Image (spheres, coloured by chain):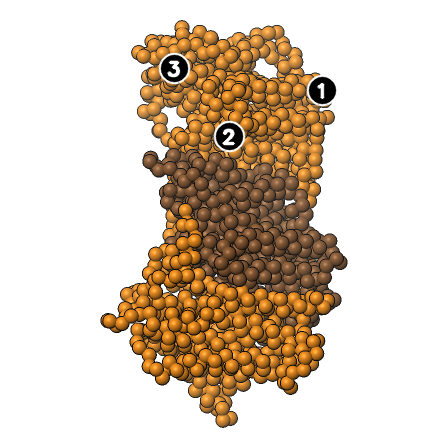
């Protein structure tokens, strides 16, 4: 190996380092943004390197912090799943910084904006990479605090209210996780996930284990806004500054999805069947509910937030089917949705920034598209990707999902989500028509300039590439799925690693 | 490979159209010349396909020598492949041949309109998609192009997007064909999983396997649904008339010859694999028949030329679906003849409609009439097209109708149904004839209305429709065109799966079909003659039901449901929480197996022996009572104090445990909390606090009951779980003994908690102080920037009259000199205490966090006593962002030092020993100590950020205002 196992920490510590430096650059407004971008670019590079390294090795890169052997210290584990999630998140977060740099929002110029942006990155990345359930709690807290503040300072006047509700509900979620980790510690005497997995498998009859499982499940459900734990999400993702909501609705909600994958394939392998049933039921409800919500709402950003409820539902159903192909399709779906949703939210924000009254409410953005035909092409492509229409990456997700549903013989749930996926076409079609095709109210004109379209262009470009040439992502996803089938590999990688 | 070039030609054309715009070539070239140039792409395709025809025809049934395949998604076993057989060839020639004419026509239709580059780009994209669809060598490739045709046609139909009707028509088409697309994808994947491959070659040869599978009906239904929506079969036909808001060149191309035939193509293509079953027969025959009649009947009611053509197209598509359902040789002959005949006359008629619209400004039959003199060429073309549509000899349409009649009178059709089919076909034929007559007579004959100006279109514009019109005359009029018959036979054979004989002779003797045809023509002529009366009567007798209403109803049902869904997001946090908690309860009930019963059966024994037990009980009760008081006390300040009391009681319990480290943190945090909350309280206007209190304490009986039940339930569950946790400890934790053994030897800490916090799990602490710091920075940013920007004022309780606010503490009260001198002394004292905490943290209870909070509390005291200005003046070092940043940076750098020594990051180091510094006993200069210092600094930073924001008394905050001014206003 070229580099020591410390590279696992780079995607976590680089943004934190950047955040600390950013605080010291309190009076250098321009440099702060560039520093944030540089740090994120470096961090993204390191995470891509990490993923390649893990792929190359075929086993996880494990780092025992401070040299304390697992399970006594804190362990960082980059296996295929977490490395993939990290690359995805860092890609979107980097694009988010890029969007913020070209944004006309006032809040992105507040001195602490990029600091919080970077700690958000640390929180999310750390949550994916940590192999310790209490350490996960700490990272989740960092994520919550950063996200709350970033939304509270938004230009949107409902930012504070949305942030408050999110914070309140997230606090309760944190309590769920605290209870879960406490109970697991009581029952099995350890906090290390690999160790826990081995001990749960060895002694599944601990009376507190199922209770802990439910609390852990509830925690991840709040994180991914699974119905009925979703109430914070539409407000929160709408009111956040666009650069931030692009992250929240694309990668941050994937923390729960990641958690479900870990729960069903690592922590509670023997109990996975019942968990999967729950996930399928909630996933189908989410697909229908989110799709309808997106149709019913009157705000472009909020529509996309509801759409996330539905899209996460698709992922849950795939995780619920649980076959290797279904898990692979879940990974593909997770990855592609992040790109698509981030791009669409950025475009919605860019539209809002050009509206006569700055807002993404449909009544304000009707016809605004006429000043940005290029943005219209991007939005159309992104919308098609979201609806799963070729030649965009969303099609690969949808096709793989359908295929895995047929292979798993889950015809009923497949039929339900297939039907509900038509909702996507309705809301995206309507939104596109409203913004780009309907005429503006007489006498009003869009602003000539607004948020830069660079970041969404890049993301849509990636969507197009992954749609035309989807094989690398599919291969990665299949590798992840088959790795997930091997809980022993993870356990041994962590507990017997040379550290 | 060459097969792909066919697509690339059209895609390159689309790109060229885009370049025309981007490169500003509209000054040098007209849109007409661009369009004519672009016609080379389909023209080349046409010639190329024609060149391959002999080879394809020679290959015969089920074979194709022209294949090209590329491993697109090998992980899923999917290829991108293309394939050319008789069926694809027929469609490919139609698409490219009519494509050339359409492009020529478009050039003149949009003459002088440079913005039509967009239309040309969409049109060529559509052409590429359509060619890809019929040339696809496997189901997935077909599906990709299938969806591409839906999208490009969406763009074409909405080309004039400023029209409401164009937008609605495009959206409806997208929705219906998109819905069909989802079903189709599922169906195709099902077939693929049964046949084991997505390649046509394999699927077409595994018909028995597929039909024998249990899932065959499902797969068939899904695929047929997809095809029906695309080919406008009733009741999904409603999108086609709406799509007539497309510019006429698009309608002539998409809605006559190409896109609507995609479903026909798919069904014909799948016939060898899925066909020849009862289900296939009934589904296709009935849907086809229904569509045929619907189109024929509704068409007669139309006044718009294009709508009339659209309904006759629907009727013809119905015929084709019905034919595919029959699965006889003659049916497939009828199918291919019908496809070709319909494509020829319908494209001609659509282009004629476009010319009429272009030259007279209207398409409404009621405003047209008598223009045949002014437009002789157009009239002739229309006449030929209409005669073919009416199925009159000697035109090609006649042959199509004859073979159709021969099919439905074929002996294989079940008893009774042969009569019904025949009757239906004769009726539809009569109605179509009447429609044709209506079209020609209404537009060209009769009296010319006042003020209707008309003149002949430029020659290239009418030459384009003339070509197919003449073709439909020539094919049947010339003696046996063997090449065309061979092509049609090859196409029919591909669809039928066996050899089909096709002859194009018009006269085959006096047969049953001919007699039926005579009946249909007579009936049609009668209807035409009495057209006005018939139309009026029809409209009054038969219900005016259209499926539009069903579609609207469905869509508004969805909207209604959507509205209800968004209503659940009502904004009341309290009910959000109760839903969440109830959901958690349900999950626990079903999955969790809560140990509810056990603890209450074996009631815990209360052991009050031991001297501390009473104290424990007391603090426990105090904690509970104080917690209750926080809820019940109506005054905010008292509630805060009660909260603090509850926290301190917990601290007392911890001390008795004994867990002095945790107890100390608990006390410190408790004090800090009170200070922050009290400061925050002063910032909230009384009116708002009153309102909040009102909403907190005034709620309906039901919601109160709900809250009580939820709270009690949550309490019981947590009690049970905690009890279980306390009584069922199976064994000692694995970690505890390790920490006890190794704390001193490995980290040099006597205090195990200190060792865990700073060493074993130092990374937790690292992230936790980041959380704390970000909370502080967050409050600071929110209050000093965001709220100021939003126009919130710093609303403090009004000061007592006659006193300046700025140098005062809480509530505007003056402070006594004694208190002030105490405060002055407290700060240095606090710093000393902090320092000892830091230095001895590894040996004694206490750590960097407590050190930081103690220092901060002293500063908070200053804020209260001296007021903001004085404090800021005297404590210039107290700048939160820098302190926080420095603290975090120090922590990170300290953690990274081991890297330089080739040790793992975050490893414990003893700097003192390394540098050879001798320190007093009991003190060590370790990395842990530096870490504690970093924690303390960043904690002071975090707290000071909060104090700075909360303690700031004035609106004219110089720093913040300066910062805000540097920030351009949000736009």
Q: Is residue B267 left or right of residue B169?
A: right
In space, the residues marked 1 and 2 are separated at their CA atoms by 33 Å
Q: Residues within 10 Å of mark 2 (few under 14, many from 20)?
A: many
> Which residue is pictured at 44% across the width and 64% down the height?
B779
- Work out whether B177 lies above or below B515: below
Residue B46 in percent (x, y) is at 62, 19
For label 1, the residue is B55
Specify which label sits upstream in the sequence, 3 or 1: 1
Name the residue tied to disc 3: B360
Judging from the image, mark 3 belongs to the subunit labelled B
Same-chain check, marks 3 and 1 = yes
* Residue sitting at x 38%, y 34%: A439
Which secondary structure, mark 1?
A: helix
The spot of residue A205 in percent (x, y) is 61, 71
In the rendered image, residues at marks 1 and 2 fall on the same chain: yes
User: At 49% across and 39% down in the image, what residue appears?
Assistant: A375
| Residues under numbered marks 3 and 2 in contact, where contact means CB atoms less than 8 Å apart | no
Answer with mark 3 or mark 2, whichever residue precedes in sequence.
2
Callout 3: SS:
helix
Front one among B91 and B778: B778
Identify the mark nearer the N-term, 1 or 2. Answer: 1
Question: Label 3 vs label 1: CA separation?
Answer: 47 Å
Mark 1 residue crowding within 10 angstroms, few (<14) / some (14–19) / many (20+)? some
Q: Looking at the image, which residue is at 60% across and 28% down?
A: B11
Residue indicated by mark 2: B153
Considering only vertical position in the picture, is B365 above or below B241? above
């Amino acid at each position: 190996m070229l580099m020591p196992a410390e590279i696992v920490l780079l995607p976590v510590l680089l943004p934190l380092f950047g955040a600390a430096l950013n605080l010291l650059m309190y009076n250098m407004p321009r440099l702060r943004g560039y520093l944030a971008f540089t740090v994120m670019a470096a961090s993204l590079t390191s995470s891509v390197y990490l993923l390649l390294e893990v792929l190359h090795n075929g086993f996880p890169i494990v780092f025992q912090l401070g040299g304390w052997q697992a399970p006594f210290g804190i362990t960082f584990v980059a296996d295929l799943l977490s490395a993939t999630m990290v690359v995805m998140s860092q890609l979107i977060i980097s694009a988010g910084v890029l969007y913020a740099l070209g944004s006309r929002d006032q809040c992105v110029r507040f001195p602490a904006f990029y600091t919080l942006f970077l700690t958000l990155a640390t929180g999310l990345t750390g949550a994916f990479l940590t192999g310790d359930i209490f350490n996960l709690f700490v990272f989740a807290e960092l994520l919550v605090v950063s996200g709350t503040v970033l939304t509270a300072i938004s230009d949107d006047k409902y930012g504070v209210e949305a942030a408050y509700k999110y914070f309140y509900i997230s606090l309760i979620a944190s309590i769920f996780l605290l209870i879960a980790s406490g109970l697991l510690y009581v029952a099995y005497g350890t906090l290390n996930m690999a160790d826990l997995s081995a001990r749960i498998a060895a002694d599944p009859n601990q009376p507190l284990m199922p209770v802990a499982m439910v609390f852990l499940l509830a925690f991840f459900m709040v994180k991914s806004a699974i119905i009925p734990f979703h109430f914070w999400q539409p407000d929160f993702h709408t009111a956040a500054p666009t650069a931030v909501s692009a992250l929240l609705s694309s990668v941050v909600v994937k923390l729960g999805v990641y958690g479900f994958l870990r729960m069903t394939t690592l922590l509670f392998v023997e109990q996975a069947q019942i968990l999967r049933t729950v996930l399928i039921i909630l996933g189908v409800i989410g697909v229908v509910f989110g799709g309808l919500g997106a149709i019913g709402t009157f705000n472009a950003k909020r529509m996309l937030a509801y759409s996330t409820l539905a899209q996460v539902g698709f992922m849950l159903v795939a995780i619920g089917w649980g076959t290797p192909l279904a898990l692979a399709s879940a990974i593909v779906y997770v990855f592609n949705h992040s790109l698509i949703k981030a791009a669409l939210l950025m475009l919605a924000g860019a539209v809002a920034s050009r509206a006569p009254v700055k807002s993404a409410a449909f009544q304000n953005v009707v016809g605004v598209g006429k000043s940005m035909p290029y943005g219209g092409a991007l939005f159309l492509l992104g919308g098609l990707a979201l609806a799963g229409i070729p030649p965009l990456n969303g099609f690969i997700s949808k096709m793989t999902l359908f295929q895995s549903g047929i292979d798993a013989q889950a015809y009923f749930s497949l039929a339900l989500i297939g039907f509900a996926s038509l909702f996507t076409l309705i809301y995206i079609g309507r939104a596109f028509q409203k913004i780009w095709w309907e005429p503006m109210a007489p006498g009003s004109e869009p602003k000539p300039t607004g948020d830069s379209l660079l970041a969404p262009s890049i993301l849509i470009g990636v969507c197009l590439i992954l749609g035309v040439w989807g094989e690398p992502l599919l291969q990665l996803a299949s590798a992840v799925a088959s790795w997930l089938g091997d809980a022993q590999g993870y356990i041994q990688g962590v507990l017997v690693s040379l550290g | 490979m060459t097969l792909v070039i066919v697509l690339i030609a059209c895609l390159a054309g689309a790109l060229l159209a885009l370049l025309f715009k981007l490169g500003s070539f509209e000054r040098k070239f007209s849109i007409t010349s661009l369009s004519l140039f672009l016609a080379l792409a389909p023209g080349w395709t046409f010639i190329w396909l024609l060149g391959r025809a002999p080879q394809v025809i020679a290959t015969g049934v089920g074979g194709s020598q022209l294949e090209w395949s590329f491993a697109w998604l090998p992980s899923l076993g999917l290829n991108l492949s293309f394939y050319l057989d008789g069926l694809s060839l027929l469609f490919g020639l139609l698409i490219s041949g009519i494509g050339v004419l359409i492009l020529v026509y478009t050039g003149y239709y949009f003459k002088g309109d440079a913005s039509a580059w967009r239309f040309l780009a969409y049109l060529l994209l559509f052409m590429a998609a359509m060619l890809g669809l019929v040339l696809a060598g496997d189901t997935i490739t077909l599906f990709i192009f299938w969806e591409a045709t839906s999208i490009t046609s969406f763009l074409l139909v909405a080309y004039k997007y400023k029209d409401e009707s164009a937008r609605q028509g495009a959206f409806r088409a997208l929705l219906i064909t998109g819905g069909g697309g989802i079903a189709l994808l599922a169906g195709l994947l099902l077939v693929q999983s049964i046949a084991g491959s997505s390649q046509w070659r394999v699927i077409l040869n595994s018909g028995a396997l597929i039909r024998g599978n249990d899932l065959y009906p499902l797969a068939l239904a899904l695929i047929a649904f997809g095809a029906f929506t695309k080919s406008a079969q009733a009741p999904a036909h409603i999108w086609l008339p709406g799509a007539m808001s497309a510019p006429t060149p698009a309608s002539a191309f998409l809605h006559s010859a190409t896109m609507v035939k995609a479903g026909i193509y798919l069904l014909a293509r799948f016939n060898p694999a899925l066909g020849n079953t009862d289900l296939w027969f009934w589904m296709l025959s009935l849907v086809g028949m229904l569509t045929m009649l619907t189109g024929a009947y509704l068409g007669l009611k139309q006044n718009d030329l294009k709508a009339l053509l659209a309904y006759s197209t629907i009727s013809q598509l119905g015929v084709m679906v019905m034919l595919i359902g029959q699965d006889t040789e003659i049916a497939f002959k009828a199918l291919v003849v019908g496809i070709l005949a319909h494509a020829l006359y319908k494209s001609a008629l659509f282009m004629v409609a476009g010319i009429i619209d272009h030259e007279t400004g209207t398409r409404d039959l009621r405003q047209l009439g008598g223009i045949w003199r002014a437009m002789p060429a157009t009239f002739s073309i229309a006449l030929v097209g209409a005669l073919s549509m009416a199925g009159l000899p000697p035109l090609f349409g006649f042959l199509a109708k004859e073979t159709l009649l021969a099919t439905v009178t074929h002996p294989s059709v079940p008893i009774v149904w042969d009569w019904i089919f025949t009757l239906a076909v004769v009726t539809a034929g009569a109605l179509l004839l009447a429609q044709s007559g209506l079209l020609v007579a209404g537009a060209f004959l009769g009296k010319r209305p006042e003020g209707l100006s008309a003149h002949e279109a430029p020659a290239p514009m009418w030459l384009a429709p003339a070509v197919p019109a003449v073709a439909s005359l020539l094919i049947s009029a010339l003696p046996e065109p063997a090449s065309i018959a061979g092509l049609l036979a090859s196409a029919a054979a591909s669809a039928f799966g066996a050899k089909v004989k096709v002859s194009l002779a018009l006269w085959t003797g006096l047969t049953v079909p001919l007699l039926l045809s005579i009946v249909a023509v007579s009936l049609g002529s009668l209807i035409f003659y009495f057209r006005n009366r018939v139309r009026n009567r029809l409209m009054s007798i038969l219900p005016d039901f259209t499926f539009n209403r069903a579609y609207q109803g469905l869509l508004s049902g969805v909207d209604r449901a959507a509205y209800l869904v968004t209503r659940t997001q009502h904004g009341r946090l309290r009910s959000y929480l109760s839903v969440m908690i109830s959901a958690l309860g349900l999950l626990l009930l079903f999955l969790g197996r809560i140990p509810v019963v056990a603890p209450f059966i074996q009631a815990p024994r209360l052991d009050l022996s031991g001297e501390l037990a009473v104290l424990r009980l007391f603090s426990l009760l105090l904690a509970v009572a104080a917690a209750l008081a926080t809820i019940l006390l109506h005054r905010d300040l008292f509630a805060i104090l009660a909260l603090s009391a509850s926290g301190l009681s917990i601290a007392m319990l911890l001390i008795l445990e004994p867990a002095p480290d945790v107890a100390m943190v608990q006390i410190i945090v408790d004090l800090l909390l009170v200070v922050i909350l009290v400061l925050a309280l002063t910032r909230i206007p009384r009116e708002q606090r009153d309102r909040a209190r009102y909403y907190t304490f005034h709620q309906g009986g039901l919601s109160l009951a709900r809250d009580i039940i939820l709270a009690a339930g949550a309490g019981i569950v947590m009690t049970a779980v905690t009890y279980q946790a306390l009584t069922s400890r199976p064994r000692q934790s694995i970690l505890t003994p390790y920490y006890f053994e190794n704390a001193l030897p490995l980290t040099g800490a006597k205090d195990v908690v200190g060792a865990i916090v700073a060493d074993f799990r130092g990374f937790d602490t690292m992230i936790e102080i980041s959380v704390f710091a970000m909370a502080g920075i967050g409050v600071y940013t929110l209050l000093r920037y965001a709220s100021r920007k939003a126009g919130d004022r710093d609303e403090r309780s009004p000061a007592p009259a006659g006193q300046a606010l700025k140098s005062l503490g809480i509530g505007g009260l003056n402070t006594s000199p004694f208190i002030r001198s105490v405060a002055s002394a407290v700060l240095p004292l606090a710093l000393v205490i902090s320092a000892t905490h830091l230095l001895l943290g590894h040996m004694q209870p206490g750590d960097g966090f407590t050190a930081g909070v103690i220092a901060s509390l002293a500063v908070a005291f200053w804020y209260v006593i001296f007021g903001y200005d004085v404090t800021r003046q005297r404590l210039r070092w107290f700048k939160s962002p820098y302190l926080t940043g420095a603290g975090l940076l120090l922590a990170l750098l300290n953690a990274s030092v081991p890297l330089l020594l080739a040790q793992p990051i975050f490893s414990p180091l003893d700097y003192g020993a390394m540098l050879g510094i001798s320190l007093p006993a009991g003190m060590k200069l370790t990395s842990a100590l530096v870490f504690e210092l970093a924690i303390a600094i960043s904690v002071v930073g975090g707290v000071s950020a909060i104090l700075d924001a909360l303690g700031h008394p004035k609106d004219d905050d110089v720093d913040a205002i300066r910062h805000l001014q540097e920030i351009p206003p949000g736009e």
